[in-house]
Image (cartoon, rainbow, N blue to C red):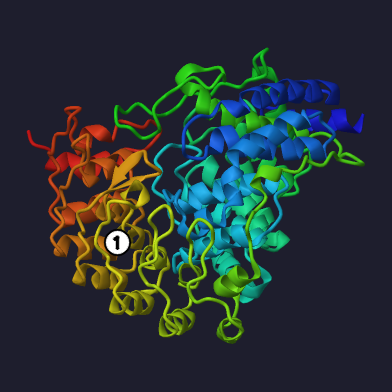
């Protein structure tokens, strides 16, 4: 009777769905979706790790277990084992061979690792420290992916990176962990999201970064206010409700905002989800991508319904499993995920921990006891390569005769590894003084160069050091073997504007083009990164450049729907009549 009166009162003030689905209906809907996302989990065939087909299903299964939903653990173990097997290699971690968009890509796969039950280790600590080092001064992490909603927001990259630091940064770096998370909390609290994705990950990020309950309550209220009158949530104000935004909002509100399952907005959102689920268990969400530019790996059928909408729809369905699971009681004895043995770090040795995270005195003691200064893993990752985050340890090893040009089987050497550490100019100088070369080498996997890796850090001093000793600022690399990018392209995409100015002063054309003859201005316009558009125009970029698609930067502003006209308004006055 009380519930009915409360519902009747709410119905007088706002449209609500008073007939909330029963727990039986919610459970049945979730189980249909679990069967579907497990069915397609092994079908991802692209070299880059997938947030929508790999991380999100793994996180959904973790939430499902916590609320007593049935999971095929044999299938879950097999999928996690295949997708996360690369986490077993400390060589891959130190070299970061999968480097593409660190805060997003590494943040997502470390979230997937945690959800799959993969415990902290030396190997995963390497990834977490790298993310901590790449945090920007104001506390956030940038990204250059331009696929909304799941891979564009800086709230997503910031919150995922903070979660990875919180869980996987080792105790030896506890002070760095605390400082990194404190900066992240300040940024998350002080920055206003523009969309539901941002609001969702802002709330989750505040939880992961250890924010007090009062901060999370305020963020929850902001997210609650974004719901539509039909009960769902839109990606951005003015768009229709969709399953992706509705489900992620409910999940964050329940997990991080401590909003009651009986609150009207939550019940209405769950009713919207149950009403809009397909019989096969999927929720289909239309992609906002309309561009001919290659913003994703080449399309292929993964087995999930929806054609070209299947990737976003798989993520939406995974979020929906979590939202529905959060409406069910917590399981008294939740099932534990089966061990992902193929992703268990292998070949970790005590000397590696000392090289990576130990003190100078500890490393000195090991060398004095007979550790070979050129010790390396079977894959060729050397003691020197593991020590490049610490100038004092690098100088010790060089003084003891470390081979500065020793390469691993993938062609990486100490200079290449050191170039991805922000603030590392003294180490670069020391390595170059001993004979390391920043010039391009043909045998390095994906044509990776030290200067390309410096572009991720935005460190102008490091770039100066490399270019002064022969690095080619125009040389491209193939990120994960899929995407050809130059240092300038990475710097523009990540908002490293001091480095952008320096590279152009060093002779790189502001209108350099890629394989599709697109300029950095075209990409910035497509991604609606207005600060980048303004800077490139200031530096002389051609607003009327025509690429192989016959598009100008202005025309590219229509390549992704759901944005305001602000980017187009910057370019229209400059368009050739």
**Image position, residue 417 (x, y; %):** 42, 64
Lateral position of residue 561 relative to residue 260, left or right: left
Classify 333 as above or below 437: above
Which residue is located at x 50 percent, y 65 percent?
A: 139
From the viewer's perspective, tell me whether residue 370 is left or right of residue 148.
right
Which residue in the rendered view is the most extreme toward the left?
577
Quadrant housing residue 270: top right
Q: Quadrant of the N terminus?
A: top right
Above or below 310: residue 557:
below
In-image side of 303 versus 134 (left or right): right
One can see residue 410 in this view: yes
Horizontal and vertical percent position of residue 48: 47, 39
**In this orientation, does residue 322 appear?**
no
Nearer to us in this view, 357 or 21: 357
Q: Where is residue 498 drawn, in percent x and y?
A: 27, 66
Circle 1 residues within 10 Å: few <14, some 14–19, many ≥20: many
Identified at 63% across, 61% down, the residue is 348
> Where residue 500 sits in the image (x, y, percent)?
25, 60
Q: Report the residue that reaches farthest toward the top.
A: 279
Nearest the viewer among 399 and 503 is 399
Quarter of the rendering occupied by the C terminus: top left
Image point (46%, 53%), residue name = 102
**The quadrant where residue 77 appears:** top right
In this rendered view, identify the residue nearer to me: 288 or 80: 80
SS category of the residue bearing label 1: helix
Instruction: Identify the residue under disc 1.
Output: 451
């Amino acid at each position: 009777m009380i519930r009915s009166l409360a519902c009747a009162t709410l119905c007088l003030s706002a449209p609500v769905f008073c007939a909330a689905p029963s727990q039986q209906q919610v459970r049945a809907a979730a189980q249909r979706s679990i069967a579907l996302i497990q069915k397609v989990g092994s079908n991802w065939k692209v070299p880059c790790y997938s947030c929508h087909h790999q991380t999100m299903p793994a996180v959904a299964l973790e939430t499902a277990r916590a609320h007593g939903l049935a999971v095929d653990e044999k299938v879950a173990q097999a999928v996690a084992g295949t997708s996360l097997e690369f986490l077993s290699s400390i060589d891959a971690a130190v070299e970061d061979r999968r480097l593409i968009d660190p805060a997003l890509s590494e943040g997502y796969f470390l979230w997937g690792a945690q959800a799959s039950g993969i415990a902290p280790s030396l190997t995963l600590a390497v990834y977490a420290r790298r993310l901590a080092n790449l945090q920007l001064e104001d506390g956030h992490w940038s990204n250059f992916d331009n696929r909304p909603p799941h891979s564009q927001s800086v709230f997503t990259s910031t919150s995922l990176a903070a979660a990875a630091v919180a869980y996987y940064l080792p105790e030896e770096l506890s002070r760095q962990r605390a400082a990194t998370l404190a900066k992240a909390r300040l940024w998350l609290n002080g920055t206003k999201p523009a969309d539901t994705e941002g609001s969702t990950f802002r709330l989750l990020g505040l939880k992961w970064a250890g924010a007090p309950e009062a901060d999370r309550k305020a963020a929850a209220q902001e997210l609650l206010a974004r719901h539509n009158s039909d009960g769902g949530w839109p990606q951005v104000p003015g768009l229709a409700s969709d399953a992706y935004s509705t489900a992620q909002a409910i999940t964050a509100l329940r997990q991080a905002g401590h909003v009651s399952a009986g609150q009207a907005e939550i019940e209405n959102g769950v009713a919207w989800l149950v009403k809009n689920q397909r019989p096969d268990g999927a929720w289909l969400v239309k992609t906002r991508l309309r561009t001919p530019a290659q913003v994703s790996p080449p399309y292929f059928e993964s087995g999930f319904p929806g054609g070209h909408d299947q990737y976003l729809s798989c993520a939406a369905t995974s979020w929906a499993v979590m939202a529905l699971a959060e409406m069910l009681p917590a399981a008294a004895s939740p099932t534990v995920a089966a061990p992902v043995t193929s992703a268990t770090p292998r070949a970790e040795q005590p000397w590696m921990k000392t090289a990576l995270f130990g003190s100078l005195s500890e490393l000195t003691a090991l060398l004095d006891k007979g550790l070979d200064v050129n010790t390396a893993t079977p894959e060729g990752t050397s003691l020197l390569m593991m020590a490049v985050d610490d100038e004092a340890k690098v100088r010790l090893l060089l003084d003891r005769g470390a081979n500065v040009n020793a390469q691993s089987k993938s062609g990486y050497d100490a200079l290449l590894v050191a170039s991805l550490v922000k603030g590392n100019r003294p180490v670069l100088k020391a390595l170059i003084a001993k004979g390391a070369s920043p010039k391009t080498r043909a045998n390095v996997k994906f044509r990776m160069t030290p200067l390309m890796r410096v572009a991720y850090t935005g460190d102008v001093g490091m770039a100066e050091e490399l270019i002064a000793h022969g690095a080619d600022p125009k040389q491209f690399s193939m990120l994960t073997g899929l995407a050809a990018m130059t240092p300038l392209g990475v710097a523009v995409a990540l908002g490293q504007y001091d480095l952008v100015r320096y590279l152009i002063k060093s002779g790189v054309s502001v209108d350099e083009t890629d394989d599709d003859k697109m300029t950095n201005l075209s990409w910035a316009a497509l991604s609606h990164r207005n600060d980048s558009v303004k800077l490139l125009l200031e530096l002389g970029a051609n607003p009327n450049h025509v690429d192989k698609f016959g598009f100008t930067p202005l025309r590219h502003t229509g390549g992704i729907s759901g944005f305001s006209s602000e980017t187009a308004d910057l370019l229209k006055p400059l368009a050739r009549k």
